[in-house]
Image: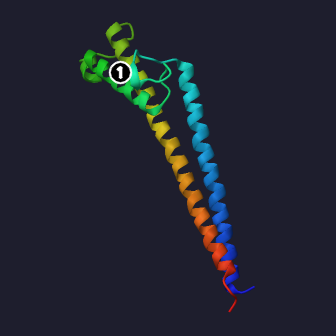
Amino acid sequence: MNITRTLAVAVLLLGLAGVVIGGVFVGMGISKSNDLKEAMQEEQITLGIEGEDLEGGVIDSMGEAMAAGDIIREHRRGIATTYSELLGEGRYNPEDPTQLSYAQALNLENYLYLAVVAFGLTQATAGSGAFMIIAGLALMGTGTILYRLPRT
């Protein structure tokens, strides 16, 4: 086997590996996105968001989570602009309804923004996988052309 055919086989195998690994990445991205969506649907968070911002009645997508997180942040800042302002010189008192509401809003806001990041990560994973598939197919095409070159 000459050097061109050896190189062609190596490029074909590298392309095949890219397609397979890319497929795994796309599958992982889609799977984790669906898992995240199901977990959010179990929580049944709606926050009274209406219209185009909320499809299906429950917050379960990146856009909906971002909109809900922004609404909660706005309401939380209506209680106190910062956590330090809320506490003043004192310590957190879970029996104080204002401090408890603030802490619960902060927790829910963080949950929603974490969901935004998680959805973004699943999209980046799937996008990387799609790129790997395209690059793998290009390598396989190049390998095929190299393999078919006439022997010299």
The image shows residue 152 at horizontal and vertical percentages of: 68, 92
Q: How many marks?
A: 1
Q: Check the image and report above or below for 128 versus 81.
A: below
Task: From the top left corner, tell me how far across and down residue 30 is, in percent.
Answer: 59, 40
Q: Looking at the image, which residue is at 26% across and 24% down?
A: 82
Dot 1 crowding, Cα within 10 Å, few <14, some 14–19, many 20+: many
Q: Which residue is mark 1?
A: 72
Give the image location of residue 27, x and y in percent. Answer: 63, 45
Note whether 112 is above or below 33 in the view shown. above
Q: Dividing the image into 4 quarters, which one contains the N terminus?
A: bottom right
**Apparent side of residue 67 relative to residue 24 in the rendered image (left or right):** left
Compared with residue 109, is residue 145 higher up or lower down, i.e. above or below? below
The answer to which quarter of the image holds residue 142 is bottom right
74 shown above or below 36: above
Task: Report the side of 4 relative to 129 (left or right).
Answer: right
Q: Secondary structure at mark 1?
A: helix
Residue displayed at 67% across by 63% down: 16
Of 73 and 71, the residue lying toward us:
71
* Residue at (64, 73) in percent of width and height: 143
Which amino acid type is marked by label 1?
Ile
Camera-nearest residue between 134 and 88: 134
At a point 66% along the width and 61% down the height, the residue shown is 17
Indicate how the structure is coloured in the image: rainbow
Viewed as shown, does residue 15 lie left or right of 114? right
* Image position, residue 12 (x, y; %): 67, 70
| Residue at the extreme right | 1
